Image (spheres, rainbow, N blue to C red):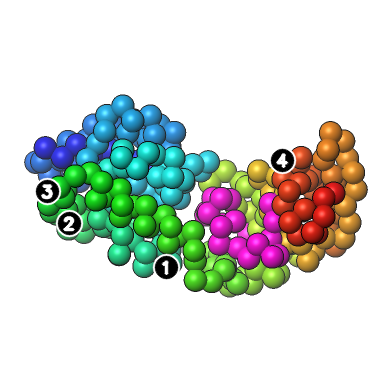
């Protein structure tokens, strides 16, 4: 039997994987997890052979979960993801397989068959660990930073250039983009988005806030080592003490 774990923050998505997995006689679902922390605990406790892993989850993304796991405890991975061109290209080389939402039963069976073959062929779990480590390293070195975002709003698809964005804030499972008088919601985690933005122009000033440094008007000391950051549009944000080093790297000197 292949002992498998399901990790997805969406209840319907978890149910779909479990429903399809029930038709595979050699797949045993040993845990169903709604977030990365639950998955981390389950993997360390159960040591599954296979994980159906969603990428875009709040707080702890699929990639962040893998980074927190010891290399010798990494199971085989079938990624579950909404469309992400860069990530999918990487998965084709490093993951056992991926399921692109929405997927059907035939596509699920094909992914499981790929995983089944790989798990049966590997001499030790270290092969899969090496594959996933290589995936994580490749994702840390993207070929280019994002210069535009594709946002769906009221049935429209908007191509938003990153240079137009004033600041961004976490909003549950989304990131709210503030660009002039307009706001847009992007289904993404702050950590994933930060890694794809050009660090010369976008810096994180709070766990839930990223700003475009070209939109800064002034900084003023606040209290307890914090600062207020005023943007050109007079929006005032807080630079928390834990993110002051981000400004130091941009300014070339400490605040």
Determine the secondary structure under disc 2: helix
Whole-number angstrom distance, CA of label 2 to CA of label 3? 10 Å
The residue drawn where x is 70% and y is 65% is 201
Badge 1 vs badge 4, beta-carbon distance below 8 Å: no
Sequence order check, earlier mark of 2 and 1: 1
Front residue of this view, candidates 141 and 167: 141
The residue tagged 4 is 242
The residue tagged 1 is 85
Whole-number angstrom distance, CA of label 3 to CA of label 4? 46 Å
> What label sits on residue 114 in the rendered view?
2
Residue 224: give x, y in percent of width and height: 84, 33
Farthest residue to the top: give it: 45
Confirm whether the magenta stretch covers residue 185.
yes
Whole-number angstrom distance, CA of label 2 to CA of label 1? 21 Å
Q: Which residues are magenta?
A: 184-204
The residue drawn where x is 72% and y is 52% is 246
Determine the secondary structure under disc 4: helix
- Of circles 2 and 3, which is in front? 3
Give neighbour class at mark 1: few <14, some 14-19, many 20+ (Cα, 10 Å). Answer: few
The residue drawn where x is 82% and y is 40% is 226
Residue 245 visible somewhere in the drawing: yes
Sequence order check, earlier mark of 2 and 3: 2
Sequence order check, earlier mark of 3 and 4: 3
Sequence order check, earlier mark of 4 and 2: 2
> What label sits on residue 120 in the rendered view?
3
- Of circles 1 and 3, which is in front? 3
Badge 1 vs badge 3, beta-carbon distance below 8 Å: no
């Amino acid at each position: 039997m292949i002992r498998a774990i399901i990790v997805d923050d969406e209840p319907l998505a978890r149910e779909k994987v479990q429903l399809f997995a029930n038709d595979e006689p050699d797949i045993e679902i040993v845990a169903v997890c709604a977030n990365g922390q639950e998955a981390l605990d389950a993997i360390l406790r159960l040591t599954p052979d296979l994980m159906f892993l969603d990428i875009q989850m709040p707080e702890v993304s699929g990639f962040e979960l893998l980074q927190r796991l010891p290399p010798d405890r990494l199971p085989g991975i079938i990624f579950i993801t909404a469309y992400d061109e860069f990530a999918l290209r990487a998965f084709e080389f490093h993951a056992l397989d991926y399921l692109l939402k929405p997927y059907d039963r035939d596509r699920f069976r094909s992914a499981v068959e790929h995983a089944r073959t790989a798990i049966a062929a590997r001499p030790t779990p270290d092969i899969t660990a090496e594959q996933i480590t290589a995936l994580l390293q490749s994702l840390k070195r993207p070929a280019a930073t994002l210069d535009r975002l594709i946002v769906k709003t009221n049935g429209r698809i908007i191509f938003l250039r990153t240079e137009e964005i004033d600041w961004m804030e976490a909003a549950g499972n989304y990131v709210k983009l503030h660009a002039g008088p307009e706001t847009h919601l992007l289904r993404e985690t702050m950590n994933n988005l930060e890694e794809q933005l050009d660090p010369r122009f976008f810096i994180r000033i709070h766990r839930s806030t990223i700003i475009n440094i070209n939109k800064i008007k002034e900084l003023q000391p606040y209290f307890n080592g914090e600062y207020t950051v005023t943007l050109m549009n007079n929006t005032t944000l807080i630079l928390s003490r834990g993110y002051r080093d981000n400004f130091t790297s941009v300014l070339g000197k400490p605040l």
